[in-house]
Each structure stands twice: as structure tokens, then as C-alpha cells.
Image (cartoon, rainbow, N blue to C red):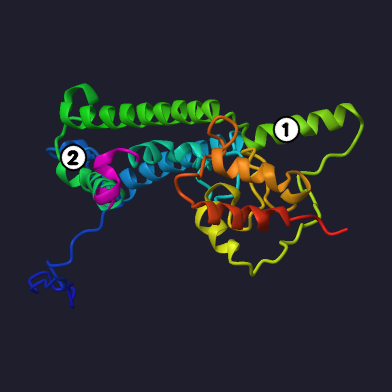
Amino acid sequence: MAHDHKSNEKVVYVGDSRVRKRSNKTIVPPDYTAFPGKSEAFIPNFLLKEWLVGCVVLVGFLVLTISEAPPLGYPADPTNASFIPMPDWYFLFLYQFLKYPYASGDYVVLGAVAVPGVAFGGLLLAPFLDTGKERRFYRRPIAASLMLLSLIACIYLTKVSWDHYQHELEITNTIPEHIEREEKAREAAEKGQEFSAIKKEEAVALVDADDPAMEIAKANCIGCHATDLNGNKQMKVPSLRGVGDILTKEQLVETVTNGKGGGAMPSFKDKLSAAEIDQITTWLSKQKKAE
């Protein structure tokens, strides 16, 4: 600026050329489509959309599991050879897969860990392995084929498992507990009575539980009659407690020796000696309710 009114005095300006002029215009970043191979930012745009889709799928799955709740089946009993295990419907495909010889027995680690691990690992690594720009499924034959194959396998294994379960119920003449409970509740409602699924029954104590015949019973009878010898009413396996009030010693000998019910009660004449049959039937004839 000038320091005097004389016109021939040198004018000096004070300033710094490094200071840029400010602009009031808002800087708009370029659209991601302007960059080769880019459509949107992974964080947060793409990730947020994936989370929203995942939440919708999860809520839909939860609604489905609530509306089609898995029925309460019989208590698991590993000593009961007639027990039919049944998982929840959304695990049926894995349950059926583990029935196959190459996924069970000596290969149970392969079926229970290796194969599901490969499937989960492939799903986890899919975003890193499938890096193509194309997103239309019919132009992604490998990814689309694997997803379609997985979906078909799940549906097929679920259907096969359910059909096999229904077949087992039919050949064993077993009524699922939840259906039996619904029928009894409906009958009670028609009679104007209250129905309770919890039954209180007086326990029948074993007579002379320390008898050596108890060891024979444990080795041969608990597979069907349960470890406590109370039987299984759902599977129509009678209790051995109190059996002395129902069958005589002679009837017990005939039943144990030759079986009964077309194989429902197997014959033990080839498994037990005559002395052992006499020992266990004598003990069973003592199993009577206390008066």
C-alpha cells in the first residue's frame, strides 16, 4: 500500500501467494461409476445393504420357526433300541447326510466336520474368490450352479429324511408324542375336562433289586425295557416292574424262552441257558406292587 500522497512513490503489496482463494462452492465427489470396475463403496454402502438383507432373511427364518415350531418328541434314551430320534426340521438335511456310510461310522469326522467346514469356508471366501464384475446370476455359471446345487441338495435330503421317518413310524406302529398329546387334549376338551401332559404315576419299586438275576436283566432287557425297567409306553414296551401281578412264573418262562408278539418280544432260548431263564423268571415273578 502507499505510505505518502506523492505519485512517484513505489507501491508495495503485502501478501502470500501460497494462500489459495477460498471457494464457497460445495465439492461433490465423483460417482463411483466413474472409476473402472467400481459401483459403490464397500464400506458403508455395500456392507449396509448386505446387513439389511441379512436381517430380513433372519427375521423371515425366525417367523417360520415360530409358526412351524418343532414338536416335542420322546426323551432320548440311548438304551432303548426302538427309539426313533428326530431333529428339528431345519436340521433334517444334515441328519440325513450323516446316515450315509461315507459320512458316518469310521468317516464321521469327514461328515460332521470336513464337509460342513468346506461348505462354510467356501461361503466365507466367496467374496474373495468371485471377483468378477458381472452380477447377473445367469452370467455367473460357476457361482449360480454351486448355489443351485446346494439348494437342491438341502431340499432333497430333507424330503428323504422325512419320508424315512414316516416309514419308521409306520412299520413300528408308533404315534408321535405331540400328535397323541393333541388327540388326548381334544378328547378332554370335548368332555369338558382339563388335560395335562404331565402324568403323575405311582412308582413301582423293584423287589429284591440286589438279586443276581438283575445282572441278567441289565445285559438282555434294558435295550427295550429301559435302564430302570419301566418300559416305554409310547413304543408299547411294557414295564417289568409289577409284571408278577400280570404273568405267572410259567407264562414268564414261556415268554422269555419262545418270545411273544411276532418278534416284538424276542426269544432268548439261544442266548440264555435253562438255568438263567429259570433264575430271571423266578425274579420277575416276584415283581409285584406293594399292597
> Residue 182: which numbered mark, if any?
1
Left or right of 63? Residue 238 is: right
Task: Measure the C-alpha gap from mark 2 to mark 1.
Answer: 58 Å
Residue lying at the far right in this picture: please name it.
Answer: 192
Q: Closest to the observer: 111 or 32? A: 111
User: Which residue does the image show at 62% across and 40% down from the upper left?
Assistant: 254
Q: Earlier in the sequence, mark 2 or mark 1?
A: 2
In the image, residue 40 sits, relative to residue 146, either above or below, namely: below
Compared across the picture, whether 45 is left or right of 82 comes to left
Quarter holding the C terminus is: bottom right
Residue in front for this viewpoint, 248 or 274: 274
SS at mark 1 in the image: helix
Q: Which residue occupies the foreground of this view, 221 or 10?
A: 221
In the displayed structure, 287 sits above or below 100; it is below
**Above or below 214: residue 38:** above
Tell whether 258 sits left or right of 122.
right
Q: Residues within 10 Å of mark 1 (few under 14, many from 20)?
A: few
